[in-house]
Amino acid sequence: MQLTDQGYRLNENINPLDLVEKYDAPLYVYDSAIISRQFNKLETAFKVPKLQINYACKALTNINILKLMKQLGAGLDTVSIQEVWLGLKAGFDPRDIMYTPNCVSIEEIEMAVKEGVRINIDNISILEQFGHLHPNVPVCIRVNPHILAGGSYKISTGHIDSKFGISIHQMPHVSRVVEATRLKIEGLHMHTGSDILDAGVFLQGAEILFNVAANFKDLEFVDFGSGFKVAYKPGGNATDIESLGEHLSVRFNEFCKSYGRDLTLIFEPGKFLVSESGYFLAKVNVVKQTIANVFAGIDSGLNHLIRPMFYDAHHEIINISRPEAKPRIYSVVGYICETDTFGDNRKIAEIQEGDILCFLNAGAYCYSMASNYNSRFRPAEVLIHNGQDYLIRQRETMDDIIKNQVEVNLESLQESKV
Ligand SMILES: *Cc1c(COP(=O)(O)O)cnc(C)c1O
């Protein structure tokens, strides 16, 4: 988003205030040009013979975003059978979908096998059952390299206490299971969590995976997961993709040489691809001066954007209705009936009731984590593509709130029991 002489503009001269006028608020808006930019950045950073980027779709699951990713040449990383079905519906080839579940039943894994997608297994119990059921279906193994990748503990997945992956120290046991069941291991995978601050940690994880890889003869790919960090504030920390690409490409190519053939290098970014593409627009209902603070209460809450309350995530907040106004200090809060804070002590251009606030980095883990808490409707979603705005999800209505509820006649039930 840019500030112009005529106020804030999204891509292609689209005025976000016009979108609110047209679709109402609160509203999620995604800019496809930013998604393409991020995709290209990743694709050009890694110089290896075979590279595949699987979009981790749990970040933003609108089917139009999935189709866009397919057009860009991405595969899909899925964590539930429902995401698998969504990916198939979006037109992905089953072999371009990786299914990476954690703690799901063998029955759900069976469903994924039936769909023909790639299976990533993250515990020995399931590996053993799978080996007996489907000795001929190749699988990938999710390895836990036991590195703490930085970022928030809540979103780290590769450390010693994590529930994810099979420990590198259990590889002898894995080898035994593989030999006994004659399973074909087609890939190795690691994903050490979100927001990796230090590219060195990636390289350290890579070395660990290369070591493990030497024990498996049938590999076709090595998947380094994701965790790429994007900047949440102007000048904030972000993963240096170019530098990581340079170093990792060299090591990967060396590894392939010693392994004896070219493997595919896979990444599965979610946040990196979609975070910056998203804007969340919400109207200010109340400006409330208390003895200690000034609150800007908006027509939304943690039901629409839970990241600040869930893991202290930072979203920049801009008053797009009043770009020229003098900044003042606010706490921006939501309408949910419990602590519901989007940001404390924020310097924002003076807010008046009815103004529209814009939250940045609202593409990843925002709409996809939205709920109906407080029986509120989830917002609409709009995609900006080639200079045009398209409604890609309707705002919910009362029908959505009530549609799965089953009303029983409690009075008559009580009577029949007496
Ligand atoms: C969530 C997830 C990702 C994506 O993580 P980001 O931090 O959004 O890039 C990748 N792989 C797996 C297995 C995941 O669960």
Image: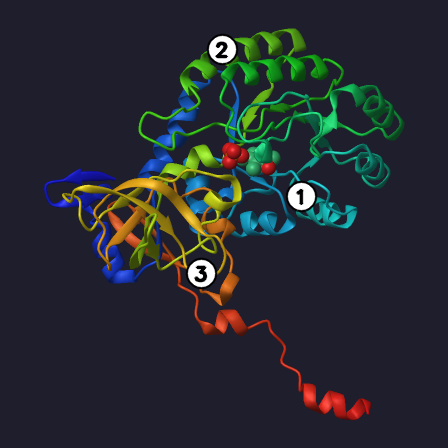
Residue for badge 3:
378
Quadrant placement of the N terminus: top left
Q: Do the residues labelled 1 and 3 touch (CB within 8 Å)?
A: no
Residue for badge 1:
116
Which one is nearer the viewer's eye here, 101 or 357?
357
Apparent side of residue 269 relative to residue 295 in the rendered image (left or right): right
Tally of numbered discs:
3
Q: Is residue 162 above or below residue 261?
A: below
The extreme front residue here reads 291
Which residue sits at x=89%, y=27%?
Answer: 180
Q: Do the residues labelled 2 and 1 touch (CB within 8 Å)?
A: no
Cβ of mark 3 under 8 Å from ligand 1: the answer is no
Which residue sits at x=46%, y=59%?
Answer: 336
Which one is nearer the viewer's eye here, 303 or 71?
303
The answer to whether residue 196 of the structure is visible from this angle is yes
Q: Quadrant of residue 78?
A: top right
Which one is nearer the viewer's eye here, 171 or 352?
352
- Residue 343 placement (x, y as % from top left): 38, 43
- Residue 219 placement (x, y as % from top left): 69, 22
Q: Earlier in the sequence, mark 1 or mark 3?
A: 1
Q: Which of marks 2 and 1 is nearer the N terminus?
A: 1
Q: What's the residue type where badge 2 is placed?
A: His
- Residue 258 placement (x, y as % from top left): 65, 6
Q: What's the residue type where badge 3 is placed?
A: Arg
Label 2: how many Cα within 10 Å (few below 14, some 14–19, many 20+): some
Q: Which mark is residue 247?
A: 2
Q: Which mark is residue 56?
A: none
Quadrant placement of the C terminus: bottom right
Q: Quadrant of residue 157?
A: top right
Q: Nearer the viewer, mark 2 or mark 1?
A: 2
Q: Is residue 331 above or below residue 209?
A: below
